[in-house]
Structure formats: structure tokens, C-alpha cells
Amino acid sequence: MTIVTGVFPSAPIGNRAAQALRRVGFVHVNLLLPGSPEKLMNAVQVSETEQPGMGAALGGVVGGALGIAGGLGLGPAVASLLVPGVGPVMALGLAAGAVFAAGGAIAGAAAGAQLEADTTNGIPADELYVYKDALRRGKAVLFVQARDQEEDERARVALSAAGAETIDAAREHHWIGLRSAEKEHYQELGGDFERDESEYRRGFEAALRGSGNSDEREATNYAFRRGYQRGLEQRRQVEGEW
């Protein structure tokens, strides 16, 4: 099983995409939405019939039949979480809940249900900081757990058709938002940012992922170490504590 991830600009758009994916035959659709249940209640229960075009577009792209599933809604596999550095988040689906270690709570609530009952594995933990950044910005993060290569390819096409931003694009947007400040900081230290940006960024993102230096070259690389230290500061600032 592989994971295909898409980032949508808002909770309503992400939820409508999740509904459409289910209606064209995808079973393992998981969703992270920013906000409290009270705030999101209306947004996540928007009927697909009020959004003409999305379901039909996905049906044409992936060859599925519309109307075979009842839409995502607020079913049993739902958890409300308070995520440090993000705030309230709703997780719909077992794998989505597992991203923030709430998979057990969701699994208990969904016991006996067919929804994502077979797995909560596969979400890339090293992308957690990208998910958090997207949620802080009010975006929705959707995961499709593809059962084989054919479904993986269909999911990628379907997410693209629904207007999703890829996780790679979301990672780039995260860095672009920080780049100017990090360039200024590194140059104040006397570094050549244009030359060292790649190593500096690798160190910065390693700190955000919670991973340390993996080899001697990284441990002794000035740009990597400076980026790593700066990434630690960023993570502490965002989450309040380490």
C-alpha cells in the first residue's frame, strides 16, 4: 500500500474532493482539516450535489461510477485534536488520525466499521512539518491509501483533476515562505547563501522533521549545522516547546 497526498486551499474544497474520490471508487480516503468541529460542521457536510462538475470530472478521469458511496460526512472515524503549533484539527479516517498519534482513538470509535479498517500505516512521518504548515495556513490535507500501483496512478490523476497541490509543491511553498528571512540570517553570519542554500535547507528541514545529523560530513558542514540550528529555533517557536 502506498500513500498519495494532496493539499487543498480550504476545508470545504478538501472535503468535496474527498467525497468525490469516494464516489468514484476510492475506499481509503483520509482527511485533515484545520479548525474545531463547531467551526467546520457546515463546511465538511456540504453536499457534492451543490458542487457541480467535480464528481463528473473525476469520474471521467478515473473511470469510476458516481454515486456508489454516500460521501464522507462526519462518520464514526473522526477525531478532534489539539496540535501544538497548529491549533484544533479534525482528522477524518484512521490513517489521518495516526499522523498525530490519534489513530487508536479513531480506531476505537470506528470499531466494526468498514471505513479504513485494515490499516493506519504508510503516512510519511518526515513530511509532518509540511502537513502542519498547510494546516496553519487554513489548508486541508488529503491522503489516499492506494492498494496497488494501478490505484496509486489513478489517485494521482484524480487528485490533480480535483485541483490538489502535491506534497512536493507544498514543501517548496513552505521553504519559499521562509527563504528571505533565512537568507538574511545566514548572510549576517558571513555565509554565502547562494552557494550554500541547498545544505542550509537540508539542515533546516532535518530539524523540522526531528532528525539529526546522519553522517560525519553533515555534522561538520557549516551550512548544514547553521540551518539545523535555525530549524530547531523555528520548531520551538512554532510549537512552544521542544
Image (cartoon, grey):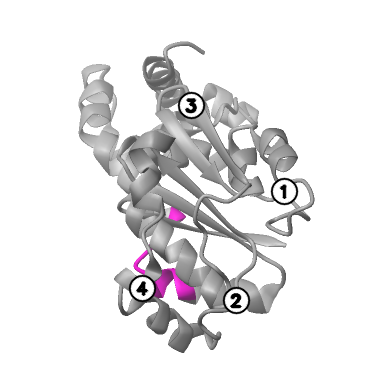
Of badges 3 and 2, nearer the viewer stands: 2
Q: Residue at x 55, y 86 (%)?
A: 65
Mark found first going from the N terminus, 4 or 1 = 4
> Residue 184 falls in which quadrant of the image?
top left
The residue under the point 34% across, 50% down is: 43
Name the mark nearer the viewer: 1 or 3: 3
- Asked whether disc 4 touches disc 1, contact meaning CB atoms under 8 Å apart, the reply is no
What's the distance in space between the residues labelled 2 and 1, CA to CA?
Answer: 21 Å
Horizontal side, residue 190 vs residue 240: left or right:
left
Disc 4: which residue: 49
> Given this view, does label 2 or label 4 mark the residue nearer the observer?
4
Could you give the CA–CA distance between mark 4 and mark 1, rounded to whole angstroms? 32 Å
**Residue 61: image location, x then y, percent:** 46, 85
- The alpha-carbon separation of the residues under discs 3 and 4 comes to 32 Å
Most distant residue in the top direction: 241
Q: Residue at x 45, y 50 (%)?
A: 141
Foreground disc of the pair 3, 4: 4
The tag on residue 25 is 2
Residue carrying label 1 = 121
- Whether 8 is drawn above or below 152: the answer is above
Is the residue under label 2 in contact with that under label 3 (CB below 8 Å)? no
Q: Which residues are magenta?
A: 158-167
Snapshot quadrant of residue 38:
top left
| Kind of residue indicated by mark 4 | Thr
Instruction: From the top left corner, tell me how far across and down residue 14 is, in percent.
Output: 39, 57
